[in-house]
Image: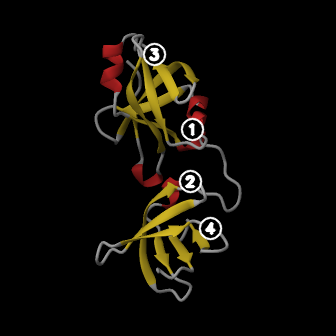
C-alpha cells in the first residue's frame, strides 16, 4: 500500500497545485485543472498527492505520462479506463511545499498571501486577503472586510498599490482608495 502523508496544515506542508477534471478518452486519461503558472508546469511533478480520507492526509500517486494540447491531460498509474478515471474527478492535486521552486525577492505564492491582514499606510485595518485571481493585465487581490463581509478588488501591483508584504508579520500594506 502507498504511504499516506499527514499534512502539517500550520506549516502548509502540502500545497494544492490543481484538481482533476473529467475523463479524457477511454484509456484512463483525465483533464487537469492546473493552478500553476504557466498551466503546463503541473506536468513537471512525477508524483502527485491526492486526498486519502480528508485534506489532512495525502496519498502519493505516480503520474505515468502527461501531455498537453490545448489543455493539460494526464494518466495516473493504475487508471486504465474511463470508469476508473471518472472516480478521480474533483480530487485536489498537491505537492510537498519543499518541491516548489524558490522564488525571487518580491515574488509570492498566492497560498501565502491568503489570510494576510491588510492595512493602509496609516495602519488602519482594511480586512484580510480572501483570494486572488488573474485578469490578464495584472493579478487582483480580493480583500474581505471581516466586520461586514464586503469585498473589494484591488490590483496586485507591487511597489505601487501594494506598498509592502510581510509574510513573517502576516500583513500587507496597500495604498488604495475604493472608488
Quadrant of res 59: top left
Q: Nearer the viewer, mark 2 or mark 1?
A: 1
Residue pictured at 34% horizontal, 29% vertical: 89
Position above or below: 10 against 161: above
Residue bearing mark 2: 109
3D distance between C-alphas at marks 1 and 4: 22 Å
Of the numbered discs in the image, which one, if any, rests on residue 157? 4
- In the foreground, 153 or 89: 153
* Quadrant including the N terminus: top left
Residue bearing mark 3: 77
Residue bearing mark 1: 39
Mark 3 touches mark 4? (CB < 8 Å): no
For the residue carrying disc 4, how many other residues have a C-alpha within 10 Å: few (<14), some (14-19), or many (20+)?
A: some
Going from N to C along the chain, the mark reached first, 4 or 2, is: 2
Going from N to C along the chain, the mark reached first, 1 or 3, is: 1
Q: Secondary structure at mark 3?
A: loop
Position above or below: 56 against 147: above
Position above or below: 16 against 172: above
For the residue carrying disc 2, how many other residues have a C-alpha within 10 Å: few (<14), some (14-19), or many (20+)?
A: few
Q: Secondary structure at mark 4?
A: loop
Going from N to C along the chain, the mark reached first, 2 or 1, is: 1
Going from N to C along the chain, the mark reached first, 3 or 4, is: 3
Q: Nearer the viewer, mark 3 or mark 4?
A: 4
3D distance between C-alphas at marks 1 and 3: 21 Å
Quadrant of res 106: bottom right
Position above or below: 176 against 35: below
Amino acid at each position: 500500500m502507498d504511504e499516506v502523508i499527514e499534512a502539517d496544515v500550520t506549516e502548509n506542508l502540502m500545497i494544492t497545485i490543481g484538481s482533476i477534471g473529467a475523463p479524457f478518452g477511454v484509456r484512463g486519461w483525465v483533464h487537469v485543472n492546473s493552478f500553476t503558472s504557466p498551466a503546463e508546469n503541473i506536468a513537471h511533478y512525477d508524483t502527485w498527492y491526492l486526498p486519502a480520507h480528508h485534506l489532512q492526509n495525502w496519498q502519493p500517486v505516480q503520474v505515468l505520462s502527461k501531455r498537453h494540447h490545448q489543455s493539460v491531460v494526464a494518466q495516473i498509474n493504475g487508471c486504465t479506463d474511463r470508469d476508473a478515471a471518472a472516480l478521480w474527478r474533483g480530487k485536489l492535486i498537491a505537492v510537498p511545499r519543499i518541491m516548489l521552486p524558490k522564488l525571487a525577492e518580491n515574488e509570492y505564492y498566492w497560498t501565502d498571501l491568503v489570510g494576510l491582514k491588510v492595512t493602509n499606510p496609516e495602519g488602519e485595518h482594511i480586512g484580510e486577503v480572501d483570494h486572488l485571481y488573474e485578469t490578464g493585465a495584472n493579478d487582483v487581490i480580493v480583500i474581505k472586510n471581516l466586520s461586514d463581509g464586503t469585498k473589494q478588488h484591488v490590483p496586485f501591483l507591487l511597489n505601487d498599490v501594494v506598498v509592502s508584504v510581510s509574510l513573517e508579520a502576516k500583513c500587507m500594506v496597500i495604498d488604495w482608495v475604493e472608488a
